[in-house]
Image: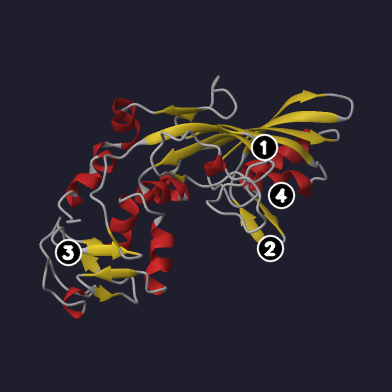
Amino acid sequence: MGNRTVSDMSEEQTISAGKQDRIAKVIARAGICSRREAERMIVDRRVTLNGQVLETPAITVVPDDFITVDGMPLADPSPTRLWLYHKPEGLVTTNRDEKGRATVFDRLPAELPRVISVGRLDLNSEGLLLLTNDGALARRLELPKTGWVRRYRVRVRGRIDEEKLATLTDGIVIDGIKYGPVTAALEHQAQSNAWLSLALREGRNREVRKLCEHFCWPVTRLIRVSFGPFQLGKLERGAVSEVSARVLRQQLGKEDVNAKKRHAHHRR
C-alpha cells in the first residue's frame, strides 16, 4: 500500500506524465458509476485513498494508490465494453427510482456485468440506449462536444407547418433556453397526426418533446433510432447486443478502448 498522504497528492502536485489521473475518473473507469456521480460520492465521504477518507475530488492518483468505495477496494478495471439496448417505453433510466417504478437495469439480462447508460431516455421514450461498463467513457459520449448525432422518429398530434419545422435548423430559444441546430423533416402526414424525423447533437433533457410542444405538436411516441454511428436497426424491444471490440476501436479510437489498461495495477 502506498504511504503518501492526501496532502501529498493535491491537484497541483507534479507526477510523471501519463501516470496520474483524477480520482473520480479512475473510479468511473472501474465501472462503478459516472465521473460526476463519483465526485458526489467523494464529497459524501464514501471514498478513501491510501486509508484516508476524501472530502474533495480535486485529487490525482497513480497506479500504486489504494482506493476504496463504501469500504470495498476498487476492482482492477475490465476492458471497455459497449452494448446496444432497445429500451421499451415504461422504464426509467436510473438504477433506483424513488417512486418504485421499473428501471432499465431491472430488465437487463442477468449475465451482463454492472453497466451504466450513456445518457438517458425518459419514461415514455423508447429505442436505442447505449450501455457501458466504463463510466468515464459514458460521460465523454454524453457531451455535446463529442459531436455524435442522436436521431429520432417522433409521432405527434396535429398538422405540420413545414416552414415552422424548418426554423429548427438555426436553433431556437424556448423559455429562455437556447437549443442548438436540429435537422427536422416531415416523414408522413395523416389526418390527425404525423411522423417526424429529428437529428440533434445536444440531447438536452426532454429536448425533442419540448421542441415539438413549442409548436403545439404533442408527442405521442418517441423512438431513438441511432446514437452516433450506432443504429437501433432490427434489434428487438428489450434486447441487448454487444458491440465488437473491433468496431469499438474503429468508432471510439484506441485511446478510449485501452484507457483502462493504464490503471490495471490498482491493488485490490
Q: How many marks?
A: 4
In contact (CB < 8 Å): disc 3 and disc 2? no
For badge 4, the amino acid type reads: Lys
In contact (CB < 8 Å): disc 4 and disc 1? no
Q: Which mark is residue 210?
A: 4
Quarter of the rendering containing residue 147: top left
Give the alpha-carbon distance from disc 3 to disc 4, as whole Å.
Answer: 46 Å
Percent coordinates x, y for residue 70 in the rendering? 36, 65
Q: Nearer the viewer, residue 208 or 243?
A: 243
Q: Which mark is residue 176?
A: 2
Residue 92: in sight, yes or no? Answer: yes
Residue pictured at 38% horizontal, 50% vertical: 135
In contact (CB < 8 Å): disc 2 and disc 4? no
Q: Is residue 180 left or right of residue 8?
A: right
Q: Earlier in the sequence, mark 3 or mark 4?
A: 3
Give the alpha-carbon distance from disc 3 to disc 2, as whole Å.
Answer: 46 Å
Give the class, few, some or many, for how many residues have Cα within 10 Å of label 3's Cα (few <14, many ≥20): some
Quarter of the rendering containing residue 60: bottom left
Position of residue 69 relative to residue 209, above or below, is below
For badge 2, the amino acid type reads: Gly
Give the alpha-carbon distance from disc 2 to disc 4, as whole Å.
Answer: 13 Å
Give the class, few, some or many, for how many residues have Cα within 10 Å of label 4's Cα (few <14, many ≥20): some
Camera-near label (3 vs 4) is 3
Camera-near label (2 vs 1) is 1
Q: Earlier in the sequence, mark 3 or mark 1?
A: 3
Q: Is residue 202 left or right of residue 50?
A: right
The residue identified by callout 1 is 89
Q: Earlier in the sequence, mark 4 or mark 1?
A: 1
Percent coordinates x, y for residue 17 in the rendering? 13, 59
Give the class, few, some or many, for how many residues have Cα within 10 Å of label 1's Cα (few <14, many ≥20): some
The residue identified by callout 3 is 65
